[in-house]
Amino acid sequence: MERRVRAMYFSGTGTTAKVVTAVAYEMWEALHENDGNVKYTKAPNINFTPKTARQKQYEFDENDIVVFGTPVIAGRVPNVLLKFLDTLRGDGAMAIPVVVYGNRDFDDALIELRNILEDKGFHTIAAAAFIGEHSFSQTLAEGRPDGEDMELASNFAEKCADKIISVPDLTLAVKVDGNEPLRPYYQPTDRKGVHIDILKVKPKLDETKCNQCGMCVELCPMGSIKKETPGHVEGICIKCCGCVKKCPQQALYFDDPGYLYHKEELELGYAERKSPKLFLD
Ligand SMILES: Cc1cc2nc3c(=O)[nH]c(=O)nc-3n(C[C@H](O)[C@H](O)[C@H](O)COP(=O)(O)O)c2cc1C
Ligand code: SF4
Ligand code: SF4
């Protein structure tokens, strides 16, 4: 028997990618070293952050083991991914759902991702919620996942490998935290408790800084930035902040008052460090 191990992820600013690629690699190493009965191959990871990558069909089978990651958006799996996730075919592959959140809460994102993967024919054998620097902020969960997180990711990978070698009961989905039915998307509110609507908010461009390098055009997971006009974001912006955080000239920024209020509220209210949660039962 030969089994393929890989990570598959969406990741606007790279925190989800960092966790799931490490878990997949270290799990493969542990399987390769400790299980003489099966040949394990480290298969290429699948990054479905670019819009073009979500236009392809991905099919797996019982010889695949996939560490599957998404960031938490408004307490849930990013809703712009739901249509794409519905096209996946697990066909008996093992999956390890992982969500990465910005130190507020992962609410129902992990249970939602687990259910989607089970529904698409994957067997979920373990799961985890990790913390990443908040997309909106440079200070909230700054620099995470950090060394401590990555050590936990490494332990988690080894435990997943142990579970795979000991032949898990594939009829049972991994138990995770979260509510069913799923709670509504988390909505930020202002001082008076009025809902802050940031749906249509888009980054602005400081033209004096931009050198038209085109990096933001490549990075935007929604394909919403055009090379000729990086200052004018056309179409959907999910506020992933990939363009804002990675622009080499720091030319992109948000100035919407509701967005800035919410960012500051998060920084003040959720400064206390949270720990990753691992699920192996
Ligand atoms: C629109 C939006 C909504 C978010 N909602 C939440 C949330 O509900 N809870 C939370 O803790 N973090 C939230 N985050 C933060 C991200 O989950 C976190 O920063 C994550 O590490 C980003 O992953 P990435 O680097 O792979 O894009 C949100 C981020 C964005 C862009
Ligand atoms: S990444 Fe920054 S400098 Fe490059 S085109 Fe975009 S806004 Fe301009
Ligand atoms: S325009 Fe919006 S969706 Fe596109 S990279 Fe920037 S923040 Fe993300």
Image: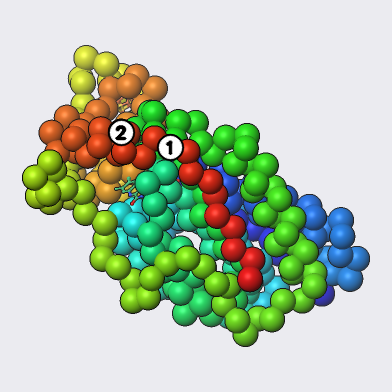
Identify the residue at the far right of this view. 36
Going by the image, does 156 lie left or right of 131?
right
- Quadrant for residue 187, please give it: bottom left
Identify the residue at the far bottom of this view. 171
The type of residue carrying mark 2 is Leu
Going by the image, does 218 lie left or right of 122?
left
The type of residue carrying mark 1 is Glu
Q: Nearer the viewer, residue 188 or 97?
A: 188
- Residue 219 location (% of width, % of height): 38, 40
Q: Residue at x 37, y 46 (%)?
A: 104
Residue 255's mark? Answer: none
Under circle 1, the secondary element is loop
Going by the image, does 203 lie left or right of 12?
left
- Residue 160 location (% of width, % of height): 70, 62
| Residue 210 versus residue 196 in the image, above or below | above
Q: Nearer the viewer, residue 267 or 40?
A: 267
Q: CA distance from mark 1 to mark 2?
A: 9 Å
Identify the residue at the far top of this view. 208
Residue 268's mark? Answer: 2
- Residue 198 location (% of width, % of height): 17, 46
Q: Residue at x 65, y 81 (%)?
A: 170
Residue 27 visible within the image: no
